[in-house]
Amino acid sequence: MAGETGERAPLDLLVITRVDSYDELPDGLTRERLGEFLHESLKPYEDPYPVILDGLDYALGSDPCKDGFVILGRSENRLLGAVVMLDTGMSRYVPENLLLFIAVDPDARGQGIGGALLQRVFEECEGQVKLHVEHDNPARHLYERSGFKSKYLEMRWEGE
């Protein structure tokens, strides 16, 4: 997974695929290994591993009330990037597509993989796409270059 070879893979060798269920994951890639890839590659902005697995279950699990898909970016069977997309089912109220996680192997960053994955997401989604990003996350610049705009101020009440 992350850092397996340390070699840089040219963008033209990147194979991008859509996965709609766990049964469609490529050989050798399990729910747990994909979760580990996301957890490690999202650092220092990662969510806890069990939360990442919950997100994968929402996108790829069998619950008929939950839906989504995953976009994988691979080169020579090495996972270089992944995007987890959720279908909110609420297009009348909020964007119907939530980009939950996007991660690129730290050894493969700066090669356009994140942009290529985002482009594929846009091709696969119908309607608007929403994401949350922390102000100091450098990936914010990729999102802005890709056309994302900061439309609202997010506010949360977290109880007492």
Image (tube, grey):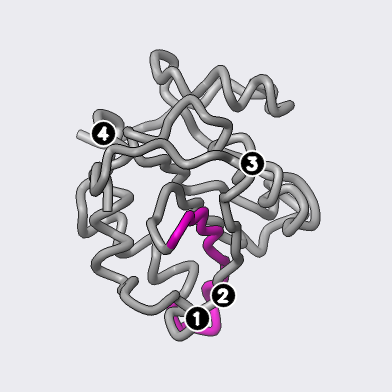
Q: Tag on residue 115?
A: none
**Circle number at residue 20:** 2
Residue 64, magenta (yes or no): yes
Mark 2 crowd level (few <14, some 14–19, many ≥20, 10 Å Cα): some
Query: Mark 3 vs mark 1: which is more N-terminal?
Result: 1
**Height in image: 11 above or below 135?**
below
Residue at mark 1: 24
| Image position of 46 (left or right of 64) | left
Picture residue at 79% right of the left edge, 51% below the top: 127
Query: Does the CB distance between marks 4 and 1 fall below 8 Å?
Result: no
Classify 140 as above or below 43: above
Pointer 1 with pointer 2, Cβ within 8 A: yes
Residue at position x 24%, y 42% in the image: 3
Is 61 situated left or right of 118 in this image? left
Whole-number angstrom distance, CA of label 4 to CA of label 1:
26 Å
Q: Amino acid at mark 4?
A: Lys
* Disc ID at residue 43: 4
Q: Amino acid at mark 2?
A: Asp
N-term-proximal mark, 4 vs 1: 1
Work out which residue is located at the far top of the displayed protein and give it.
136
| Residue 15 percent coordinates (x, y) | 58, 57
Residue nearer the viewer, 63 or 52: 52
